[in-house]
Image (spheres, rainbow, N blue to C red):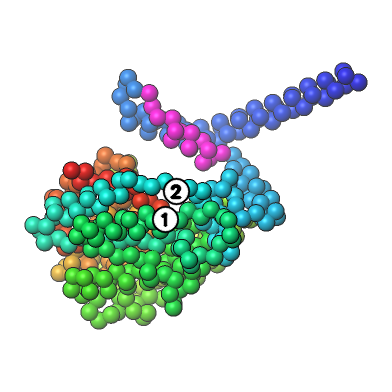
Amino acid sequence: MKKKYILRKKIFAVIFFIMLFSFSGVNCISQRKEVQKALTEELSKVHAWQIPETSNIEDEITEELAGKMYFIETYSALTEVLNKKEICNYRYIKDETGTLQYSSFYREDDDNIPEYAMRVRRMADAVKAQDTKVLMVSAPAKYLEGKTPLRKGLPANDTTAAVNELLYYMNLYGIKTLDLREYFPNDELTLSQTFFRSDHHWTIPAAYYATRILVEKLFSEFGENLDPTGYYTGRISYTPKTFKNIMLGSTGRNTGAFYVGVENFTALFPNFIGDFRRSSMAADGTEYYTKGNFADALMNIEEVAAEDNIYHVSPYTMYLNELRTYESITNKEKPDAPSILFLRDSYFSPVIVFMAPMCSQIDAIYIMEETDKIDIEDFIVKNHFDYIIVEVNPYNIGEESFNFFYD
């Protein structure tokens, strides 16, 4: 009996190791080019006597793991069947509308928030001689205190205190602010229409609504009337089009579609032509150029509409490819309109697109990107803009979002 027991254990061990090495072999073969590319990139960043950073290589291996989504979807289905409101070891929780929220049992205070505000103040002082005006914009967090329906006891990542403190010090230091939490939800957009269930971004209609609020703020605060006729901020300027069942956002790809569901994606298409020139740069310095009408220059319609793999790309990339380190957009039809520099994250990609027809020039820098291809302080000092708008997603409040004008 004992010999049979040991034999069964040996057979199981042999089968286990065969499966393990087979799985490893498949991954080695399928990921060879990606790993070589990641390793080459890391080696190019360091000197001969330094050890390359392995975390990016590990991330690449994890991202390209063979059968990755099958494992995730199996876990997703089991979690949904069990009717659990938390997933991924409480990384995310699900509210009563079925929307994924970031989870946090305890949010530590950030003692550097006054310093972040002071850096914006230093920037404002640096461009004061050019008569450049500065505005700080706080995008709405996906979890809104008192508005998001959540089962009692679930630990939502509540950014209310951090945003309140940041805006307090901005106002204290004389920086004009716009708190977009005050405008969502509203009569036009419910909470479920404001944010995606499966992504951390707001929807395109919500971004357009925020654009209208931003234009109103620039007029009320600085007297800048970007849209005298009201056309570009009115309902007649864009036509909505809904793409069915193509949206699975970044959080949804982590939890699986079984748990959160695949969403529709509503895009806004212009009812005008326009004439734009767009140049952009990725973190590695790769440059891209587009030109033509609004849709051709500023939107990425064909790739998103043709994509049939919900795990591959988010339709949010339709606007400015979601996010690049640097953007420069020139409106050839309005050379005398104001120019704006946005220091932003991915929340404002569609907002920048909607602002473009009302400006002569828009430049945008992704402030959280670690790159040696652009120096934010040097760029701001050497280039003149009528306005600098600093935008931050509440979940991104931290050192990396204010990495400029340290002293």
Residue located beneath label 1 in the image: 159
Residue 59 is one of the magenta-drawn residues? yes
Relative to 406, say whether 223 is above or below: below
Report the predominant secondary structure element of the magenta stretch.
helix
Residue farthest to the left?
A: 129
Residue 293 seen in the figure: no
Residue 8 seen in the figure: yes
Residue located beneath label 2 in the image: 107
Residue found at x 37% / y 69%: 182
Residue farthest to the right?
A: 1
Residue 233 is one of the magenta-drawn residues? no
Q: What range is drawn magenta here?
A: 51-65
Residue found at x 19% / y 53%: 121
Q: Quadrant of residue 20?
A: top right
Q: Is residue 164 left or right of residue 98?
A: left
Q: Which amino acid does label 1 sit on?
A: Thr
- In the rendered view of the protein, which quadrant contains the C terminus? top left
